[in-house]
Image (cartoon, coloured by chain):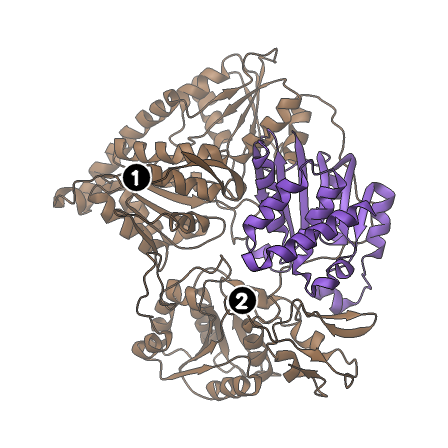
Chain colours: A purple, B brown
Amino acid sequence: MKKDILICGVGGQGTVLASKIIAAAAMEAGNNVHSAETIGMAQRGGSVTSHVRIGEASSPLIPKGKCDLLLAFEPSEAVRNLPYLKENGLVIVNSVPVKPTTESLQETGYDGTEMIAYLKKQCKTIAVNADELCERFGSSKYFNVILLGVATGSGELGLSKELVLAEIEKRVPAKFVETNKEAFQVGLQAACL
Amino acid sequence: MKNEYVMGNGAIALGALKAGVNLVAGYPGTPSSEIIETISKYPHEGLHLEWSVNEKAAMEVAASAAYAGARTMVTMKQVGLNVASDPLMSLAYVGVKGGMVIVSADDPGPISSQTEQDTRRFAEFARIPVFDPTSPEEAYEMIQEAFAYSEKYHTPVLFRPTTRICHAYANIPMQEAYQPHAYEGFVKDSKKWVIFPRLAFANHAMMEKRNPEIGADFSASGLNTVWNKDSSVSVEKAVFAGGVSYAYAKEFLQEYPQVKLVKIATPYPFPEQFAEKELEGVKEVLVLEELSPYIEENLLKLAGRKHLPVEVYGKLTGHVAAAGENSYETVSAVLADFLQLTIPAPRGLSDAPNLPVRPPVLCAGCPHRASFYAVKQAMKGKKSYFCGDIGCYTLGNAMPLDMCDTCLCMGAGVTMAQGFHWVDEEMEGAAFAFIGDSTFFASGMTGVVNAVYNEANVVICILDNSTTAMTGHQPHPGTGRNMMGDIVEKVSIENVLRGIGVKYVKTVNPLDLEEAVAVVKEATGEKGVKAIIFKSPCIAIVKSDKKAVISEKCIQCGKCIREIGCPAIVKTDGKVTIDQNLCTGCNLCAQVCPVSAIQV
């Protein structure tokens, strides 16, 4: 299998865990995997990306125009990373914006809707609303697992739901396993809508 | 043997463990910090691991252990090498018995550093070998070679990965158990281990004679390689590359295999014989590397000495950018131009909506925000100097806090505040230094001695969040924990300050705004050196369940947003709201609200 997946968002949203789970599941399926993360100062509320390269690859970062799947935790971050997406690639995006502090000071009215509209014009896009999907769990902490469910359900991840779920289970504390399974299921269903 | 999916820093750690490393010391710094953190997961008999107080201390601890024949590794980021350069320069002359590898991680971009300095230059400056891996897998193998070369030539060696190697993940072999290197112990010999001018002269001559031999050894070593040599490629053109630029070039040339790609993995002493052979018949060579034109200059030197009819393109000719990091995109553009290829352009964003900018900010609930705000309130309207330092709190420079007038290097805030005092003794406000707890121990203490001794009038604010937050929460002398897993005596910042002779030392909770402002006002009324310890733990260490909520009483004045710039406070549909996922209930906004509309 050869697949390039870019995961993007804002520091603190759980992108790193999502990339680790995808990488582990892909390895479990017998692939060679490389990935690269944003670490350090930029983590503090800045834009973050994880590049996951499944199959043989030389560059640690995905070349622009070669990404198969863009998994975006935030609408403007999806647009920022759109140059990485290949011609007929898929974008899975959370439509709920994270407003930067600078935005509140300047009040430019950024609310994410213009980003989703732009994405839909440019490429295949699955937009999901994190707030709505997380509501029943009472916490946005489950959103990364939900988004993994959407990615798996879309078929573009190229990994079976059993493989991905097994890696999720390995990484969450025992008492949260059931809720995470449920969250993953919510994602799988959202992909079909 | 099984594999572990680890980042390049983990690969370096596992390679060093395989080499039987006996002692590892370092100071945290992005992108190097995870090397020591990985090693700490494999504790075993015969291995000492420590976060040293700073890079100079780490270098010296490792040096004497290497004199005794132990295999030692020191880790730091590139600017840390500046701190450790005093022992390093002399150590290069003295040499070692056990293998000693100094890992200095470079940060092209820079992504989280003050400089774009090139450790390869430092190696040449210090006259010691340097290894430059192009991937995590190679870093794992190469660090083992580095120990062997260090022992073979009795010299410390440098090992310099860059951010994209340090933070790239790959599958690396991991052993069930690690066998420490057996060593003889220190054999006293003052003619060998005590550096005097006579010894320095003799060893300088020895190093200059030895280094070309190491270069020849590197040429024959197999560490420097050629890819795509035998396909139907242009024999008149060649590409030379080092570090991650090699990986980018290879990715491109796999798609357009038109030219051979030569890897320089041991930049100093330059593998001349190897390079000369690969330049045979080549009329044009493109050099791809980051930071400085190091390989390029060496090829020019070689071409000049051997009268080779070759054009060398790179940073010096403007083909490759002089500053910043390379990327697949920049490398492929230069390669396409060199090979006269037309490549498709990636999707543009010219018609996209304006993207919000996301400069890094202090986390919601960060106690540093409260400390800065207290000083700002206390000094309102009085001309003051705010000297920042290296750590999360450098982010105090961002609007709306705007509380960082200077930032230079580790520990500089304490001493720079003194300089401002001496050129503006009649200032209405005060000269402040802001320094974190880890930075205070690393290089702030001597600056305080300087202030006391020279009778400077300064306020030193120690932002004590009980961790080294920016680099990933490493312990330090004030935390009471070390990397051997021991609970140790905490070094008290307050006692250190009093011991130095600072008369005014007060500890205050920055999240109690009124009290904090009062202490700052009181301190600035005193003469001499004053120290205020703003003590409150990092929000990533002590998790809080508390949340602030806005009541009906809110008059939408927006003062909370304008004054403190907390990322949890945003305007939604024109109304001020608090993001409950980010809020830690620190209570600062509630103390700022003019109508008491915020409750925790």
Which residue lies under the disc numbered 2? B393
The amino acid type found where label 2 is placed reads Tyr
Asked if residue B145 is positioned above or below residue B278 in the image, the reply reads below
In the picture, measured across the screen, residue B446 lies left or right of residue B380, that is: left
Q: Nearer the viewer, residue B35 or B224?
A: B35
Residue B309 place in picture, x, y as percent: 53, 16
Residue at image mark 1: B20
Name above or below for residue A22 compared with residue B468.
above
Quadrant location, the N terminus of chain B:
top left
Q: Residue at coordinates 63% horizontally, 46% vertically from top-left?
A: A165
Rendered image quadrant of residue B580: bottom right
Can residue B261 be seen in this snapshot? yes
Q: Measuring 65% from the left and 52% from the top, which residue is drawn there?
A: A181
Badge 1 marks a residue whose secondary structure is: loop
- The disc numbered 2 marks a residue on which chain? B
As drawn, is B94 to the left or to the right of B442? left
